[in-house]
Image (cartoon, rainbow, N blue to C red):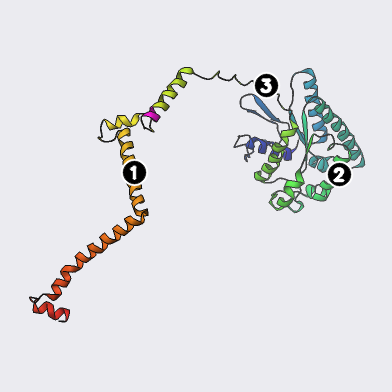
């Protein structure tokens, strides 16, 4: 495809982990193909084919190679229309030739699908007419011109021959002001289109049939000796009153009074004592006895004070202080 398709290609590589893909580099030629090998085995190739005749030639070559068994393609993404509108659409003869090329391109796209390749067509993104930087582009490639060109591709069956259509204006219409030269957008805009493409791969690519999983037989992964050891540990915890499966006895070798069976008896005694006290408090007779004992204790505390008040040997200063 053209530069729009190339930017989508770079955005797809960024999603697949190639961080520097599509970075601005003025030293590289603009109009060339790109080949990237991902994960050591998967080639992802971009072919520079800006015109419809170029796209037809590249796709026909790819289909012929698939028939010969040289190369099998899983996914083919095509895009174009801007260069055709700019360079080969001035006369009626050019328009007729372009329409005939599109019909051949549609036939090749269907042929690719017959060879089990998913074919995606990228509709040209929205043009920022005011930002076009040449007089030729402002005369032939405004958004109104490109909208008519999109209709030409639709009428000649390009969209219907696709497995999936990636609508460029859909993810760029609200970002037109960010198109710095009228045609291209910042990388993050193409990231949105690449994300749509990645989401569509779920139903574009065929499902790989996995081998049936046979679960292991019951008891195949068991170990009788380990099972017996677990029973022994559980028995130690139950009959030796140790929730740590006997390891508390190891700590009791260094700290006295920490044996689990002693702690168990102490806990039982404390529990019985507290329950006995609760029973006494709940008994009415016991409550009466308790009240009488409290009354006698209060009386004994008051007796010395009364004796002090009736004493004749009270110090005069103390008597003056208490008002006597």
Membership of 105 in magenta stretch: no
Q: Secondary structure at mark 1?
A: helix
* Cα distance between the residues tagged 2 and 3: 48 Å
Q: Are marks 2 and 3 in contact (CB under 8 Å)?
A: no
Q: Quadrant of the C terminus?
A: bottom left
Q: Quadrant of the N terminus?
A: top right
* Cα distance between the residues tagged 1 and 3: 63 Å
Q: Secondary structure at mark 3?
A: loop
Residue nearest the observer in this picture, 141 or 8: 8
The residue beneath circle 1 is 272
The residue beneath circle 3 is 212
Foreground: disc 2 or disc 3: 3
Residue at (77, 52) in percent of width and height: 129
Whichever of labels 2 and 3 marks the residue nearer the N terminus, that label is 2
Whichever of labels 1 and 3 marks the residue nearer the N terminus, that label is 3
Q: Position of residue 18 (x, y in %)?
A: 61, 34
Q: Are marks 2 and 1 in contact (CB under 8 Å)?
A: no
The residue beneath circle 2 is 151
Q: Secondary structure at mark 2?
A: helix
Magenta stretch, residue numbers: 236-240
Foreground: disc 2 or disc 1: 1
In the picture shown, does residue 246 fall above or below 79? above
Residue nearest the observer in this picture, 140 or 80: 80
Residue nearest the observer in this picture, 251 or 76: 251
Helix, strand or loop: magenta stretch:
helix
């Amino acid at each position: 495809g053209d530069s729009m398709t190339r930017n989508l290609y770079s955005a797809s590589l960024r999603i697949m982990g190639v961080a520097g893909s599509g970075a601005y580099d003025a030293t590289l030629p603009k109009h060339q193909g790109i080949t990237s090998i991902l994960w050591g085995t998967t080639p992802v190739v971009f072919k520079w084919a800006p015109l419809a005749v170029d796209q037809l030639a590249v796709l026909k070559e790819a289909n012929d190679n698939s028939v010969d068994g040289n190369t099998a393609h899983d996914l083919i993404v095509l895009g174009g229309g801007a260069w055709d509108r700019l360079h080969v659409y001035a006369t009626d003869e050019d328009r007729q030739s372009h329409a005939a090329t599109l019909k051949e391109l549609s036939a090749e796209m269907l042929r690719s699908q017959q060879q089990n390749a998913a074919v995606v067509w990228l509709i040209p993104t929205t043009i920022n007419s005011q930002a076009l930087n040449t007089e030729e582009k402002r005369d032939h490639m405004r958004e109104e011109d490109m909208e008519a060109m999109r209709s030409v591709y639709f009428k000649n069956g390009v969209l219907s021959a696709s497995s999936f259509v990636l609508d460029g204006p859909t993810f760029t219409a609200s970002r037109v002001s960010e198109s710095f030269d009228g045609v291209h957008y910042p990388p993050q805009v193409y990231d949105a289109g690449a994300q749509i493409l990645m989401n569509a791969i779920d139903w574009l690519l065929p499902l790989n049939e996995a081998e049936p999983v046979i679960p292991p037989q019951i008891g195949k992964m068991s170990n009788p000796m380990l099972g017996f050891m677990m029973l022994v540990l559980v028995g130690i915890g139950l009959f030796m009153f140790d929730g740590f499966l006997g390891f508390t006895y190891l700590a009791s070798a260094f700290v006295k009074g920490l044996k689990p069976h002693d702690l168990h008896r102490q806990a039982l005694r404390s529990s019985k004592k507290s329950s006995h006290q609760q029973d006494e408090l709940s008994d009415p007779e016991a409550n009466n006895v308790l009240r009488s004992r409290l009354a006698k204790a209060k009386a004994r505390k008051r007796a010395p004070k009364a004796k002090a008040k009736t004493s004749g040997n009270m110090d005069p200063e103390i008597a003056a202080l208490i008002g006597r």
